[in-house]
Every structure is written in structure tokens, then in C-alpha cells.
Image (tube, grey):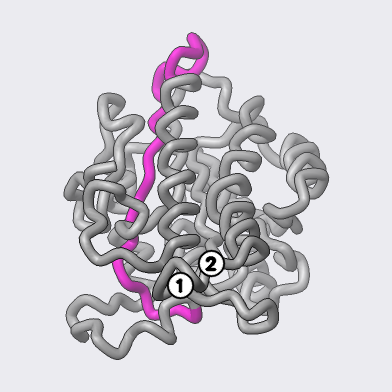
Amino acid sequence: MSDARWTSFPDPSFALIQGASRGLGLAMTRALLGAPHFSRIVACSRNATTTAALAELQEEHPGRLVCVDLDVTREHTIEAAARELGTQVERLHLVCNVAGLLHDASRQITPEKRLGDLDPAAFNALMQVNALGPALVVKHLTPLLRHTERTVIANLSARVGSIGDNNLGGWYSYRASKAAQNMLTRTMAIELGQHRRMGELICVALHPGTVDTGLSKPFQAHVPASKLFSTERAATQLLDVIDGLRPEDSGRFFAWDGSSIDW
């Protein structure tokens, strides 16, 4: 990875990836470790401290990668993680909320094809992980965001969460959870943008495209090969978009190629 990547951020910079133990979050963590001016990256997930891939990265980059357990469905773990982070870094310049839920075989969660398939338990689970979870992470990290250097909060959304772009229907719970996440992102962008000590803060929703992960695996059959991205490519594309963001972009929704998406 070139030393010249993502230089819109100061040197040194501190980043946090929520959902870092696998898939796209792991790839983003690995990519940022390839940019030396990110002197410390905090990797969070339910089992970050026991994930073999993260342990290997810690060995490869001694002192630069910190692993912290955090479960977005349990606010007390988010609060505890934020307290621990306060002992590791004095500020954050990049926060990426990556973890998401679409299906879960153990709870029989699957995208609905029709209204009759709606299940309250599944709906609530998706809302908690995809919408409320990222907002709670930012809530407890706010003290580390109160500084005047460039800062980006990037919440991983999905194009199917766009109300204006919904021409196919279906997927009620997932669409609703991502639409709710988008509204929370827009709203926090407004509030945090008014804070006098956060003058360089940008808060956006990002659509990564279809990434070759367990989340998309059951739905890849009709995705053209050119539109199915490896986690490494998707991570680089998203970090490139993040790097190019300007203060006036805060509160907006962008795709992996930098194009704007209608809320």
C-alpha cells in the first residue's frame, strides 16, 4: 500500500473500525494499517480480542492495532469500549461503522419477499444492529471527536435503504433498518456539525456495492462479476471516497464510486 494513500487526514491520525473481525471491516483495518500516518487503528467487534486474523495483524504491526470487544446490541459494552479507548487514544479522526445484519440462520432471519413474511423479532434485530447500533457507537465516542482536525464518521449503509431508489419492493426489514440508519446519520451530521469544536467533522452514509462476504453470499447469483467486489477492493474504494469528502458533503449518502444517492 502506498504511503501516499488517504492523506486528507492529519499525521498522525487515529481510526476506529466497528465490525473489524471479518469481511469488509477486516479489509478496511488491513488497508489503514498500510497507511503509516494512521498511527493507531482500533478494531472493534463482539470478539475482536479473540479473532485470529486481527491477532496476526497485531503481530505484523506492533503497537498500531488495538483490539476492543464491543457488541452493538449491548450498550454497556459500547460504553465500556469507549472508556477503554480513552486510555489508548486522545482523539479519533475516522470512525467507520461497518457491521451489519441481513440474515441469520440461527434466528431464521431472511429478507422478506412479501408483507406476510414480516416477523417482529427479525425486524427488531435488524433495527438494533443496522440502525441503533451505529448511532450508539457515535454517542459514546463523541468525547473523542471533539477536536478541530479533519474527522469523518462513515456509516456503512446500502442503496436498498434509499426510499427514492426503491423500485423493486421486498426486503422490508433490511430496507427499513438502513433507511432508519440513514436518517440517524443525517440527523447526527446536523447536530455534530453545529458543535464549535467539531468544525472539520464530516458524517456520511456509504453504500459499498455488492461485496463478496457472508452477508451477500446467498444473493450473488445474479450479480455480474464486474459488480461483485472483493473485500480488499471494496475497502480501498470506500476509503478513497472518504478521503475525497469535503465539509459540505456532511449529511449526504454516497456510493462506492463517489456518486451521490438520494435518501
Q: Tell me the quarter of the picture where residue 210 sits.
A: bottom left
The residue segment tinted magenta is: 193-214
Q: Tell me the quarter of the picture where residue 18 sits.
A: bottom right
Q: Give the spatial CA distance, label 1 vs label 2.
A: 7 Å
Q: Nearer the viewer, residue 6 or 113?
A: 113
Q: Is residue 217 above or below residue 162?
A: below
- The answer to whether residue 156 is visible is no
Q: Tell me the quarter of the picture where residue 59 sits.
A: bottom right
> What residue does disc 2 label?
118
Mark 2 and mark 1 in contact (Cβ < 8 Å)? yes
Residue 90 x, y percent position in the rendering: 66, 31
Disc 2 residue crowd, few under 14, some 14–19, many 20+, Cα 10 Å: some
- On the rendered structure, is 14 left or right of 187? right
| Kind of residue at disc 1 | Glu
Is label 2 in a helix, a strand or a loop?
A: loop
* Residue pictured at 59% horizontal, 37% vertical: 138
